[in-house]
Amino acid sequence: MAADQAPLAKELSPKPPRPRGRLLVVSGAVTVVVLALALGLGLGLGLRKNGGSNPSASSPTGEPLPGGGSTTKLEDWRLDIRQYTLDMKWDISAPPVTRHFDLIISEGQGWPDGVVRDMLFINGKFPGPLIEANMGDRLVVNVTNQLTKNATAIHWHGIFQNGTNWYDGTTGITQCGIPPGKSFVYNFTVEQFGTYWYHSHYSTQYSDGIFGPLVIHAPEEANARNLYDHDQIVLVQDWYHDFSTVNLDTYLAPDNENSEPVPDNGLINGMAYFNCSLYGADSGRICYDNNTYSVLSLEADKRYRLRLINTGSFAEFEFSVDNHSLSVIEADGVLVHPQSVHRLPIHVAQRYSAVLTTNASHSTNYWLRAEMVTFCFTGTSPVLDPTTKAVISYSGNATILPSESSVDWSDPRLTICQDLDESKLVPAVEKSPPPATTLWRIDFSFGIGDHQLDRAKVNGTIWSPLINTTTLISAVDGLSGKANGNASAWAVDGQVSSFSADQFVVGVSAEAVEVVDILLYSLDEGSHPFHLHGHQFWILQKGSGPFDWGNYYTNIKPSDPRTVANALRRDTLTIEPYAWALIRFVADNPGLWALHCHITWHMEAGLLAQFMSRADVLRTMEVPRDVRALCSS
């Protein structure tokens, strides 16, 4: 998007009626555009397929599309995925500019995989539009809430927000929600580059559609650009056929012992195939049986950077392309030396860039696969096919499903939710961690508590977002003596005790920059993708069982950075069951920063801690009036 240009909102398509007590299967009622871009680019819409097959069975091979794949009307609410093909002529060295964007949040109905359900949209579309900029640019994003009842807020996942903590978009921590019928402007400068995304940070909203990709360029990626010829965004996610609040109510109900809702399907760039016959006649659902696969139309003998983003709520995926290896070159905004893999695990909120070289047979199509790691599920779904697929086509015929020559890799699949081995991902630009100056241990677990409710605890605290205020406003006012007495009422070293009992806040830097080691310790049988706002961290060590404190002081040597030289940096990592991770970050960014599990259901159960950084700077900061006004709306 050019500087000072905003996307336009369009009207939603009319809501189809929802029958009661029966399944309505609509044949041939909805068809979509097959996008074949100039030069063969673009992850488009898509191959149609008739319903009726077993979800676990392989798809027919070489099967032509019904109607020969004719091009007809695109549903109004579907985003034109050609937006997700990046222009290689983009000037990564252009001087900084101010870029304006409008995001209009609305509600309606859609059917990304053929099953009609209530959804949320950005600018009337799903998924959300691409926001693209250069490092150093100022982004001015006007968010308008057109929802009927609920507030909203937008978090810029992975963006540091140094000096603009109040625009981090975390309800109850850095801002109150944007009320229905109101607008709010996020205004910040991006100080990094790489693959990021934005999403609602209000309750479970992003699970229903409020998210989109965010890509930041910089001259520092010039060398990496020599590794690929084209640049493409690929979103993968789990998908539910019910609105997220329905699943949340079930998950948080009494006597439900952390049994997360199992997805009904997966999506790739907002679409997927679903077999309508899996729902019984009394399901009460509308299902279009000519739903589609996404199609990635490629040129032969070219290199494609696939910017993979897991925008889902719960499931980790193993991403692969039949007959093609992948070369990983980025993890969470950090360029790494190329690492060849057949399957790439990607957990919720993580991002990778992987280069796909189209050097296989030029006369056929291939399956792109995103396989859910169902080991992490505590239940099953009778309608779920854990393998979400799209079609890689560089045969020039995007109307044919892959044939039997498209073969999945035979490598063993994951039997646990875990990250790609960090030791295989070496940052391309060395940045070794400085010596640590402080250490915190953070334990987290789940358990049945009051009223037989299953909740998450972080060092014994069950987080709940503050109402009509935020921890940031409370901290700034308290430290400056504007409220709650005076500065002496606040502990700025160690755990801050002046917040309510449902806020676990750690003061990590009081009067100067600190280098903080965090031992994240899981006392739970599930895996958890933890995200730290406002920072990247170095991953020093991961393990299971008891942590060896002797090893920490003799081998990690927090005072000697040489022992962890050029460790991988990222902002989201997976903690495996009953395991731990030792991370390090520089607490130089003033503000209140969330550290939380990015599984939607877990965060809503209370799995969130906060770090208060640079209390000396917070004492003099002024929270903008429009941010404060949200808390009185």
Image (tube, rainbow, N blue to C red):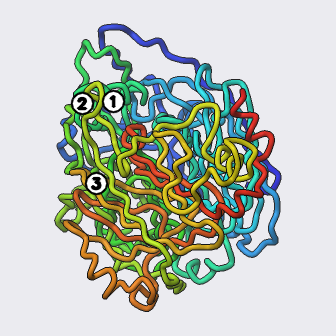
Quadrant location, the C terminus:
top right
Instruction: State yes or no: discs 2 and 3 in contact (Cβ < 8 Å).
Output: no
**Residue topped by disc 1:** 252
Q: From the image, which quarter does the N terminus lie in?
A: bottom right
Query: Where, by quadrant of the figure, is residue 514 drawn?
Result: bottom right
Q: Check contact, mark 1 vs mark 2: CB within 8 A.
A: yes
Can you give x and y, in whole percent of width and height, for residue 573 in the image?
A: 39, 63
Q: Can you see residue 47?
A: no
Left or right position of 615 against 306: right
Q: Amino acid at mark 2?
A: Asn
Q: Amino acid at mark 1?
A: Leu
Residue 13: % across, % down: 59, 23
Above or below for 470 versus 525: above
Res. 527 mark: 3
- Judge the density around disc 3: few (<14), some (14-19), many (≥20) Cα neighbours within 10 Å: many
Which of the 4 image quadrants contains residue 49? top left
Residue 568: x percent and y percent?
44, 76
Q: Is 593 situated above or below 267? A: below
Pointer 1 local density, CA inside 10 Å: few below 14, some 14–19, many at least 20: many
Nearest to N terminus: mark 2 or mark 3: 2
For mark 2, what is the residue?
256
In the displayed structure, 572 sits above or below 599; it is below
Residue lying at the far top in this picture: please name it. Answer: 20
SS at circle 3? loop
Under circle 2, the secondary element is loop
Residues under labels 1 and 2: Cα distance? 7 Å
Q: Where, by quadrant of the figure, is residue 92 drawn?
A: bottom right
Observer-nearest of 448 and 3 = 448
